[in-house]
Amino acid sequence: MTYSSRWFVIAVCFVAGCAAIPEHTTLVIESKPSGALVHANDGWECTTPCTQEVDRDRTIELAFTRDGYSDVEKTVEIPEFKRSRAATVISAAVGGVLMGAGASIADDLGMSIVCAILIECPDDHVLSSGEKLLAGGLGATLFGAAGRLIDNKRDEKRAKDPVRVEVELDKEQ
């Protein structure tokens, strides 16, 4: 491994932890029948069907009105966005086990990893426990970074999922 490729691996590990999750989400509002005027407790209004960008992790009170129909009030919980961690944890565990076992079972595998980090390799070098641990840690880091990238892509897709509100208006008697 060349000096520049080592820095690339280190950069990937740091970048893997970054994913932009928007502070807002889309609220999709529908009514049956459509054409209801929607008033929100924070001042905005729209006519169904409509969409509105709203902050995450809050509660919104909506009032639906339409001539000839009973008014409806609805409380909507806009959840906080929870990041995924499953692929990161699983990948880091698998990477640590694979690299640690690889270093313990075959010194050549661990030696090539350590040599890539240290730049030089003595011919008669036998891996110490610390170097085997280093190989396991490097595996956990690299695999964990790959898992984090998977989680980030999943999070970016989930963050775009709208919050849906549907109400049914009853005719006035």
Image (tube, rainbow, N blue to C red):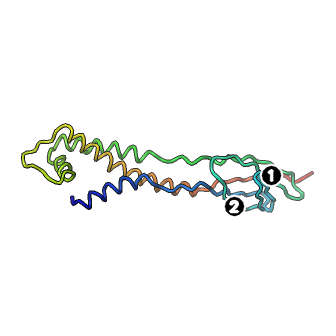
Real-space Cα separation, disc 2 to disc 1, in angstroms: 15 Å
Counting from the top left corner in percent of width and height, residue 44 is at 76, 58
Amino acid type at circle 1 is Ala
Residue 54, quarter of the rendered image: bottom right
Quadrant that contains the N terminus: bottom left
Of residues 90 and 53, which is closer to you in this image?
Answer: 53
Counting from the top left corner in percent of width and height, residue 171 is at 87, 54
Residue drawn 72% across the image and 62% down it:
50
Counting from the top left corner in percent of width and height, residue 116 is at 20, 53
Q: Is residue 47 left or right of residue 124?
A: right
Q: Which mark is residue 63?
A: 1
Q: Is residue 29 left or right of residue 37?
A: left
> Taking 94 as reference, is 26 above or below it?
below
In the displayed orientation, state which residue is furthest to the left: 124
Badge 1: how crowded within 10 Å, few (<14), some, or many (20+)?
Answer: some
Q: Is residue 53 left or right of residue 98?
A: right
Q: Is residue 11 left or right of residue 130?
A: right
Badge 2: how crowded within 10 Å, few (<14), some, or many (20+)?
Answer: some
Q: Which mark is residue 51?
A: 2
SS for dot 1: strand
- Mark 2 or mark 1: which comes first in sequence? 2
Q: Which mark is residue 43?
A: none
Amino acid type at circle 2 is Thr
Of residues 65 and 46, which is closer to you in this image?
Answer: 46
SS for dot 2: strand
Asked whether disc 2 touches disc 1, contact meaning CB atoms under 8 Å apart, the reply is no
Residue drawn 23% across the image and 41% down it:
101
Residue drawn 90% across the image and 57% down it:
68
